[in-house]
């Protein structure tokens, strides 16, 4: 046992991958990574799998391009504006503010990476949770 005493022993805590907060973070981080790839390469086209019937009537699984919308664009003044979307709606980054004004299109990648770091740190958890709970209320009302 003297060999084990030389090691730094700690209690093992298993990570809970089914935590809804972590799942929402991962979902947003995946979308942010897609946006970074789209900003770096305008021809970027992610693929998704789809079942289709071929000419013989057999079902086959094929890769089809997935539609990805840019989260940045120009406003009425000609400035570059970036929104962070969760689902189809922009997230509220600060009270009453959903967009980030950028100096140019060159800042899009740096800003997206900064937002990804903030998501990993949990800075947008409250906004994501608020948005997700609004979606749940809408589906229950239907």
Image (tube, rainbow, N blue to C red):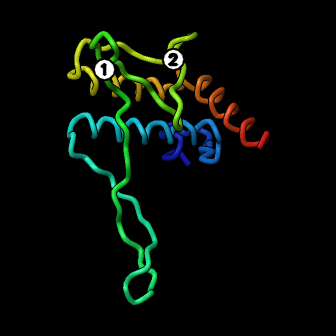
30 in relation to 65, above or below? above
- Nearest to viewer (mark 2 / mark 1): 1
103 in relation to 129, above or below? above
Gap in angstroms between the C-alphas marked 2 and 1: 19 Å
Q: Which residue is mark 2?
A: 93
Residue at 37% of width from left, 44% of height from top?
Answer: 68
Q: Which residue is mark 1?
A: 74
Q: Position of residue 103 (x, y in %)?
A: 25, 12
Residue 118 horizontal side relative to residue 68, left or right: right
- Figure quadrant of the C terminus: top right
Query: Earlier along the polypeptide chain: callout 2 or callout 1?
Result: 1
- In this orientation, which residue lies closer to the viewer: 89 or 38? 89
Q: Position of residue 86 (x, y in %)?
A: 52, 34
Task: Answer with the quarter of the image where residue 49 lies.
Answer: bottom left
Residue 109 horizontal side relative to residue 50, left or right: left
> Dot 2, how many residues are within 10 Å of its Cα: few (below 14), some (14-19), or many (20+)?
some
| Local SS, label 2 | loop
Residue at 23% of width from left, 22% of height from top?
Answer: 105
């Amino acid at each position: 046992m003297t060999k084990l005493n030389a090691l730094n022993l700690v209690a093992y805590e298993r990570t809970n991958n089914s935590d809804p907060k972590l799942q929402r973070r991962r979902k947003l981080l995946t979308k942010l990574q897609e946006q970074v790839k789209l900003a770096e390469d305008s021809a970027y086209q992610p693929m998704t799998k789809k079942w289709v019937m071929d000419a013989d009537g057999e079902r086959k699984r094929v890769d089809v391009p997935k539609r990805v919308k840019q989260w940045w664009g120009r406003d009425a003044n000609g400035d570059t504006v970036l929104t962070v979307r969760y689902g189809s709606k922009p997230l509220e980054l600060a009270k009453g503010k959903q967009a980030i004004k950028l100096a140019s299109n060159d800042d899009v990648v740096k800003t997206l990476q900064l937002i990804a770091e903030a998501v990993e740190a949990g800075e947008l958890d409250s906004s994501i949770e608020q948005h997700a709970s609004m979606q749940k209320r809408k589906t229950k009302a239907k």
